[in-house]
Amino acid sequence: MRPVVGALLTGGVMVFQASRVWDLFRVPLVGLTSVLSVVLAVTLVYWFSLPRVRRLRLFALTQIVGDIILVTSLVYLTGSEESVFTSVYNLTIISASILLYRKGGLASATLSSVLYGVLLNLRFFSLLPPAFGAPDKAPFLSAGDLFFSLLVNVSAFFTVAFLSSYLAEQARMSEEKLESAQSDLSRLAALHDHILQCLPSGLITCDSEGRIAFANQAACVITGLTREEISTRTLPSVFPEFPTSLLHEVSPDVDSLHLRRKTMGYTRPDGRRLELGFSLAPLRDDSGAFMGTILHFQDLTETVAMEEHLRKVDKLATIGEMAARIAHEIRNPLASVSGSIQILRKELALDGTNKKLMDIVIRETNRLNALLSEFLSFARPERLRPTKMNLSRLLNEIVALFTERAKGQWQMLPTISEGLVVVADPERIRQVVWNLLNNALEAMPDGGELRLRANWAHGSPPSGLSKEVRWAVVEVEDTGPGIPGEIIHKIFDPFFTTKEKGTGLGLSIVHRLMEEMGGRVEVRSQEAVGAKFTLWIPSRPPRSSKGGAPEKWS
């Protein structure tokens, strides 16, 4: 700004005072050119010095003082009391007010008044010759003229200082308020964004047509999509099972409390199936105008699985109580019937059809007795006797014994890690694993591969199992036809079986024993590929396990 003003002022003088080209080389105009050169040189010095300056207020004060001296020189070169550049002092005062506010403006006005007053007094008393040899004439007719000229210009200086400093102060206060408001707004926006991103549940906003405008971090984690992928799609394309008719129910006239929570299924890009609970609400702006829809959803997969597990446990407990009563009522008469039939078979001489019928009665009586024995085992399992045991060794013994007894066109493929030491009941573990191996073998009548894997669990255990306990994982997998999806949730129910001669209690007993030991049994199956049963066995017994205080474990 400084060189621009200097160039404009000096150029204007040259235009008005130079009637011919060679007038530009007259002494007065050369002086003005020299002042402009000094202004440019000083400006360059300031420009190069600014990055290295630490005390900016002192640097600004130095520039203002220098500018006032340059203006005084310009006034002297252009006729002192007759100079038309006296008003340039006001530009310097305004600059000082902008940079240093009221104190700077008043100081600049004071210095301008002093230098201008000294210049006029020196000229009035003829102590300072006119510039460039101009004819020496009296600048003022009297001291009154000198005083009047000083009064007018000094008053103008201080008036400009007060007005410009006042405006500068008001501008500074407005700027500070604006910065404070912008800072508060930025903090509120950051807080709002932080709250949305830290929500553990997903949040998606979309317009009335279902086009997604915003998705928080939890929404990306739950859906398995990036924010860019979600923001370029519509709500039905992200959630294919979302009931799109609900979007038309969300309107400016619908209260958000009226839209109750609903559920839907969702399959992630990685193939994982989720159960989501969601609710909808209208999205409004500050004035209350309807803008779109807010979708708030959570992953309820583990919650649904836990509820199903609790329902199954309650069902098994009820059936177990009923089983204990029925078994006592049936087993005693059955023992009498079985004993009587066996005595009659020995004493009577039966031939042909009668002998076959007697054999059928004895066989079915034994089968009914076995059914009651399994029923009692399920309803009233024996007291657990947890002890520190080598699970790896026990599993290897089970594999060797099972391979020797079982015959058929199948192949056993064990993968058992060493050093699996847990506190559990060995007989119950043996019974559980043997039942699973036997079921897997029966699922492959034409042969196949039977895999048994055992290792320490990696990562977190399933929901509902303690994360403070180390877990051993035993997997029994076959290559049979698999379990149909419509019945896989029923296989642990008592008396549910797909076998012609099965009792439907084998897997129920497995489930019950694993619950008693504080573990869990899970199943995954794919039709035409096979089924895999997973046992979660804790390294320590549960505090509520039966059998008294277990062996201390460190």
Image (cartoon, grey):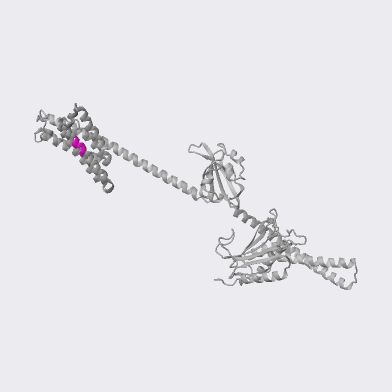
Farthest-out residue, top: 19
- Left or right of residue 322, residue 264 in this image: left
Q: Is residue 34 in the magenta section?
A: yes
Magenta highlight: main SS = helix
Q: Residue at x 32, y 40 (%)?
A: 173
Farthest-out residue, front: 22
Image location (x, y in percent) of residue 172 = 31, 40
Image location (x, y in percent) of residue 83 = 17, 31
In which quarter of the view is residue 339 placed? bottom right
Q: Is residue 54 in the magenta section?
A: no
Image location (x, y in percent) of residue 171 = 32, 38
Q: Which residues are magenta?
A: 33-37
Who is closer to the viewer here, 538 or 544?
538
- Vertical arrangement, residue 553 with respect to residue 477, above or below: below
- Vertical arrangement, residue 451 with respect to residue 59, above or below: below
- Vertical arrangement, residue 112 with respect to residue 554, above or below: above
Q: Residue at x 64, y 67 (%)?
A: 414
| Residue 169 can be seen in this image | yes
Q: Residue at x 53, y 46 (%)?
A: 229
Who is closer to the viewer here, 228 or 548?
228
Image location (x, y in percent) of residue 125 = 9, 34
